[in-house]
Image (spheres, rainbow, N blue to C red):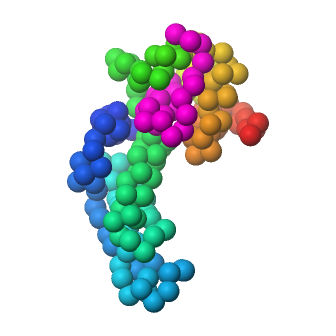
Amino acid sequence: MTAAPRTNWQSLSDDELFAQCEFDRYRASGPGGQKRNKTDSAVRLRHRPTGIIVTAADSRSQHDNRARAIKRLRAALAFDVRQPTDGSPPPPAILQAMLSGKVAVKERHEDFLPAYSWVLDVLFEQQGRLAETADRLGISTGGLVKFLETSTDGWQSAMHIRTEFGQKALRSGT
């Protein structure tokens, strides 16, 4: 899926990203007792530019569920929306990888989603070929696979890209 530049979405505040969404509240079933059955605490966000829909009904608090939904939307944008990289500089974590020869950004770090999505964009541009993607990033093929394995959702996106271009899906070592 291709749309407006995702890098702009990653840099938006939660309120700015929320403003790009249609927002629904609804009553979720499940644990939580009587209060949960009386309040519309579950949240559904539909990102208008991409059509991506995320939900959160983990908490009895609508405020908490909205924050979870925004976090899930950021991840969905990173893993599901592909953009051409030509002309756009790589995120700082990727620049560091190009210098050090490996991508070492943890999943909880603020640079993780922009870095992971940029790697997926390069993988898409290279038609799912790992060796060409690793060359473009200046890292080893093993280092690329190791980085892709850091996220289950990202790994699934990478394997989807590979199969889309007729490449064999890989088995995760984790």
Image quarter of residue 155: top right
The quarter of the rendered structure image containing the N terminus is: top left
Is residue 86 rendered to the left or right of residue 49? Answer: right
Which residue occupies 37% across, 58% down?
Answer: 67
Q: Position of residue 33 (x, y in %)?
A: 50, 86
Which residue occupies 40% across, 65% down?
Answer: 65
Observer able to see residue 84: yes
Nearest the camera: 121 or 1? 121
Q: Position of residue 141 (x, y in %)?
A: 67, 19
Image quarter of residue 46: bottom left
Nearest the camera: 49 or 73? 73
Q: Position of residue 57 (x, y in %)?
A: 46, 69
Which residue occupies 58% across, 46% down?
Answer: 153
**Residue 108 part of the magenta segment:** yes
Give the mark count.
Answer: 0
- Residue 26 vs 4, above or below: the answer is below
Q: Position of residue 111 (x, y in %)?
A: 44, 32
Stretch in magenta? 99-122
Which residue occupies 33% across, 53% down?
Answer: 47
The quarter of the rendered structure image containing the C terminus is: top right
Observer able to see residue 117: no
